Amino acid sequence: MTQLPQPMQQLMARLGPIWGTDIRGHTQTVMGAYAPLLAAADNSGISVKRDLPYGPHPRQVLDIFQPSSAHHAGVVVFVHGGAFVRGDKRASPEIYDNLMFWFAKQGYVGINVEYRLAPESTFPGGADDVALAMAWLTQNVARHGGNPARLFLIGHSAGGTHVASYVFDPGLAYHGQYTAGVVLISARLRADVSLDNPNADAVRAYFGEDAALYEQRSPVSHAASSRLPVFIVTAEFENPLLDVYGLEMAHQISLARRQAPRYRQMRGHNHMSVVAHFNSGEDALGREILDFFETGC
């Protein structure tokens, strides 16, 4: 985090050890702290098309960030978090546009996906929406400068759950179609309603009240079912147990493939800053994700 201004470094250092004591409050603090840096970023040369429908529901829409030079370019598809019951592809005027602007400045077409929320949409509704958006992109992204054969998925938090279910769950018909690789950032990979989980009620709202189904509905239970390239990212200061589940997923993939997937813990970062820092001047994670896209491992 040495690329950030000193006050930002000090704030992140102060919030880290106490992150779990007020996750929603600290999330707003982090978003507010990054806002001026993100608002000052030069995003010229990138056109943005908002709220293109990929399905019939009002939340089944996506934004496209297209660099002026894009032609048959790789495509980064981002699915935001929000504990299954809340969240928006524009959590603020800067976040999560910041990820799409950063990848667009690297030559990729950026896609920011909105999806239906629980309790209206329960398991596997989030994965269904990811599948629907990916099918739409396969048919339409070339008109926006993208290469439909190079669609890369990034999911954060609950969005990471939906992406992981889409890729790994063999009980879902689409089972990872259309994507060339997946990045799971601070993803909830196990349906967990333990006392340690401050979002247990939200997990119930999405995965259902029957705890006997949670193991089968947890992406980590299906780590062996896909051979797609996977990059798992956690923050040093996570919402309770998300770092544990990230390591568990990496371990299960390692056992299944006899080779470890790429894994990175972002030291100094918390559950929100691990995505909020994109386009702020700090780009170590972004560069590693680009390397993952190019190498496939």
Image (spheres, rainbow, N blue to C red):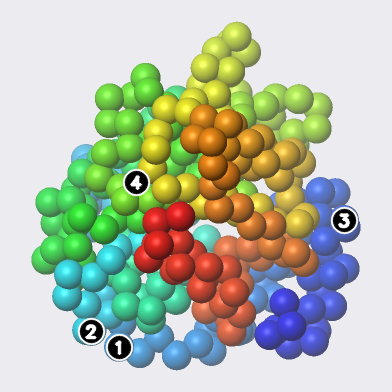
The residue depicted at 67 percent of the width and 27 percent of the height is 192
The residue depicted at 83 percent of the width and 64 percent of the height is 15
Residue 45, disc: 1
Discs 2, 4 touching: Cβ within 8 Å = no
Between marks 3 and 2 in the image, the one whose residue lies nearer the viewer: 2
**Mark 3: which secondary structure?**
helix
Horizontal side of residue 1 vs 69, given as left or right: right
Please give the residue where the numbered disc 3 appears in the rendered image.
Answer: 18
**Mark 4: which secondary structure?**
loop
The residue depicted at 34 percent of the width and 46 percent of the height is 59
> Could you tell me residue 84's position as x and y percent?
53, 38
Q: Amino acid at mark 1?
A: Gly
Q: Amino acid at mark 4?
A: Arg
Above or below for 296 versus 163: below
> Could you tell me residue 171's position as x and y percent?
37, 19
Q: Quadrant of residue 201?
A: top right
Residue 59, disc: 4
Whichever of callouts 3 and 1 sits on the residue coming sooner in the sequence is 3
Q: Quadrant of residue 174?
A: top left
**Mark 2: which secondary structure?**
loop
Between marks 4 and 1 in the image, the one whose residue lies nearer the viewer: 1
| Residue found at the far front of this picture | 258
Above or below for 73 versus 226: below
Discs 3, 2 touching: Cβ within 8 Å = no
Whichever of callouts 4 and 1 sits on the residue coming sooner in the sequence is 1
Please tell me how crowded label 1 is: few (under 14), some (14-19), or many (20+) other residues with Cα within 10 Å. Answer: few
Q: CA distance from mark 4 to mark 1?
A: 28 Å
Q: Quadrant of the C terminus?
A: bottom left
